[in-house]
Image: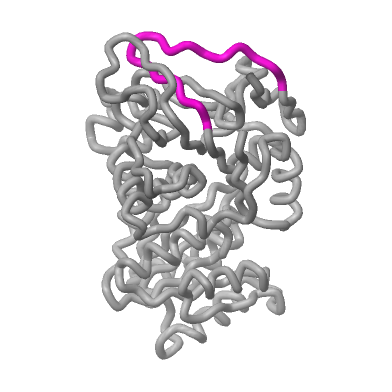
Amino acid sequence: MRAYMFYGPGDLRMEDVEPGRPGPGEVAVEIRAAATCGTDLKSYRRGHPTLFPPGSLPARFGHEFAGVVTEVGEGVTKFAPGQRVVAANTCPCGSCWACTIGRESLCENLQYLNGAFAEQIVIPRAIVERNTYEIPETLPFEAAAPLEPLSTVVHGMSESGIALGDTVVVNGAGPIGQMYIRLAQLRGASVIAADLSEGRLAQAEAAGAIATVNLGGYQTTAEKAAAIRAVTPHGRGADVAIEAVGLPEVWEQTVQCLRPGGTAVLFGGPKAGSTFTVDAVAMHYLEYKLVGVYHHAPRYVQTAVQLLSSGQFDGMTLCTEIRPLEALVASLEDMAGGVGSKYILRP
């Protein structure tokens, strides 16, 4: 079968490999749709310390997919050939200190699954048991494939405290920002989107943002934050501000968008060694709450599947274009160049 192999930064190759056979507790899936994401782009450009640890290359590539079960391993009773399924890319161990205190996204022994950009994938036992789901016929494979990023946003929503009537600012209107815009509206919030790209801001408006702020004409972080606050009620600032970019300066901008007593959800993953600055006086006297959010847990994945299956969240709204599997590298390069945001690849 055809599968992409990752040899290192900038080196992705489609190769002919032997299809996997499921062992005990495992499930083989014919992939019908796989989605690109920002993590794929970062991995393609500079590697990834947890997805591709030292000594693991070459390795299969990609982690967002949906498809049809073709074979099940010994002992599997939850799934059968012919079922339409979607799976998360990891599963927590359930027994480390983080898991035992309910912080499964911080699991010390996360089991990863790579290999979505291929014709077939074998899902390991732990992910089959806890993080694989049947999907209805009404849910297209292409709409189900972005389950993983939606699950991480569901995690962010759970930490945000967003309530009915809140004003929410989303800094960054790419795919993650669009998910936050749509889910915040489901909570009854009014959403303002800020970005440097008119194209992404147009997508934010289509997603339901009540106002957008193009930050292209501002030089400093303080100026950008002031422009955002100016469109909040009474210019007071956001009840909740979300960072969906992964740049330290946008982390600072997000905190500076807040009203007194507001919450900043710091979501985007910055590169190693990044730091950001917070005004300690404002932090104290204005009682800001800063929340870091990383990854997902099975309870958030389950919610994301329900949102997709019920139609409350349409995964196709994130899709720039559907392309053949051979277009993976070109699609990643397009993402890097700001041409589109998320591509669905059909093997």
Q: Is residue 333 above or below residue 206?
A: above
The front one of 203 and 280 is 203
Residue 45 appears in the picture as rendered: no
The front one of 27 and 55 is 27
The magenta stretch is: 15-31
Q: Is residue 128 above or below residue 280?
A: above
Residue 167 rendering spot, x and y as whole percentages:
38, 76
Q: Residue at x 33, y 14 (%)?
A: 25
Q: Is residue 116 above or below residue 304?
A: above
Counting every numbered tag in the picture gives 0
Q: Specify the quadrant that holds the N terminus.
A: top right
The front one of 190 and 116 is 116
Q: Specify the quadrant that holds the C terminus.
A: top right
Residue farthest bottom in this picture: 234
Q: Is residue 203 above or below residue 319?
A: below
The front one of 310 and 220 is 310
Q: How was the colour assigned to the protein in this rendering?
A: one colour
Q: Residue at x 60, y 75 (%)?
A: 224
- Seen in the image, is 184 located left or right of residue 208? left
Q: Is residue 171 magenta?
A: no
Q: Is residue 18 magenta?
A: yes
Residue 95 rendering spot, x and y as whole percentages:
26, 23
Residue 86 rendering spot, x and y as whole percentages:
41, 36
> In the picture, residue 281 is in which quadrant?
bottom left
Residue 200 appears in the picture as rendered: yes
Q: Residue at x 63, y 48 (%)?
A: 322
Residue 345 rendering spot, x and y as whole percentages:
62, 41
